[in-house]
Image (cartoon, grey):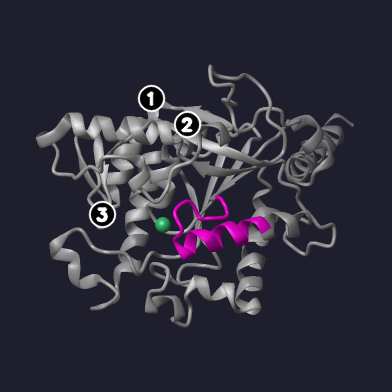
Amino acid sequence: MVIAEPVSGRAQPDGRRLLLVHAHPDDETIGTGATMAHYAASGAQVTLVTCTLGEEGEVLVPELGLLAAGHADQLGGWRIAELAAAMAELGITDHRFLGGAGRFRDSGMMGDPANAKPRAFWRAAADPETFDAAVSALVEVICQVRPQVLVTYDDAGGYGHPDHIMAHRVATAAVEAAADPACAGAGGSWQVSKLYWTATPRSVLAAGLAAVRAAGADLPFAAVESVRELPYGCDDQLVSTAIVAEDQAGAKLRALAAHRTQVSVHGSFYALSNNLGQPVLGTEYFRLALGSPAGDRDAQDRETDLFAGIDFAGIDSGGIDIAGIDSAGIDSAGTDSAGIGEDTG
Ligand SMILES: [Zn+2]
């Protein structure tokens, strides 16, 4: 079987395709960095779509502070470079911005005046034209990349940031639209087999808080007393899947450090602009929102592989993706054999 050209320095692509839809540069690493590195290293094609440039972020590096939205408003462009550096650490070669870099703007926190800026991603909540444009842009990617697995946020956007909520809504609508046989996306319609939402179990958050408190004065970060004080965290029993990728924790740590305007790293801990310390974890958690749980389970009865249960043979023989690449290969093989035939004849 002829498959896509190998990306230099990486395992030969094996037909597994994972698409992640995140809101801002850094979200991909914070929530799914180890998972992305794990699958890329093992031969899956991993594609990241980031919905905005993160223009409204706070700047943690004093000498870069004037890049911020309220001053030079150059942070978005700067963060493109941070994202590229982070993806190099994770081994991700395909990262894109929804609709192209700069199409949708970071909306700031809920209620912030930035919610209403002309290109703000959150405007899609009230403006069907903007929403449709965002969905169409993602459908285009889905129909081209043809991922069996798509990862995004839950309907609360994980912690309520408008761009995370909108990423959820756009991804959900795009998965549905891409599956419509009338889909006009490149390569025709595509049915994502499994859709996941990122999740952080409260027990894991609690263990992280305990680790931060234990590190105490060794860390420049703050700690809250209880997970109840945090605006995120998922009931453990809702978590369907745990991806153990401890061997990628170092790459995740380096990728976090690459997002230097947004993330402070100290030892094996990091903090965002709220300065709440958290350990960098090589195990990441998900909730299955579409598809059936399958494959090996861990001690908590959670799936251990995002691709478990997917019938690749069935998808590939019926789909256009691999079949299309195959027929390109078969075409050249046909040309070769014709040539051989002539020589022989
Ligand atoms: Zn974000």
Q: Is the C-beta separation of discs 2 and 1 under 8 Å?
A: yes
Badge 1 amino acid: Asp
Q: Name the residue under label 2.
A: 38
Residue at 46% x, 34% y: name it: 284
**In the image, is residue 162 part of the stretch drawn in magenta?**
yes
The numbered disc on residue 274 is: 3
Question: Gap in Å between the C-alphas at discs 2 and 1?
Answer: 8 Å
> Sequence-wise, which precedes: disc 2 or disc 3?
2
Q: How crowded is mark 3: few (under 14 residues within 10 Å), some or many (20 or more)?
A: few
Q: Can the viewer see residue 32?
A: yes
Name the residue nearer the viewer: 29 or 160.
160
Residue range corresponding to the magenta coloring: 154-172
Q: Residue furthest left?
A: 217
SS under mark 1: helix
Instruction: Specify the quadrant that holds the N terminus.
Output: top right
Badge 2 amino acid: His
- The image shows residue 96, relative to residue 320, as above or below, that is below
Residue at 33% x, 50% y: name it: 85
Q: Is the C-beta separation of discs 2 and 3 under 8 Å?
A: no
- The image shows residue 40, relative to residue 156, as above or below, that is above
- Percent x, y for residue 304? 56, 25
Instruction: Specify the quadrant that holds the C terminus.
Output: top right
- Percent x, y for residue 207? 33, 29
Q: Name the residue under label 1.
A: 247
- Percent x, y for residue 226? 31, 40
> Sequence-wise, which precedes: disc 3 or disc 1?
1
Say whether residue 239 is left or right of residue 109: right
**In the image, is residue 77 part of the stretch drawn in magenta?**
no
Quadrant for residue 219, please give it.
Answer: top left
Residue labelled 2 has its Cβ within 8 Å of some atom of ligand 1:
no
- Percent x, y for residue 278? 28, 39
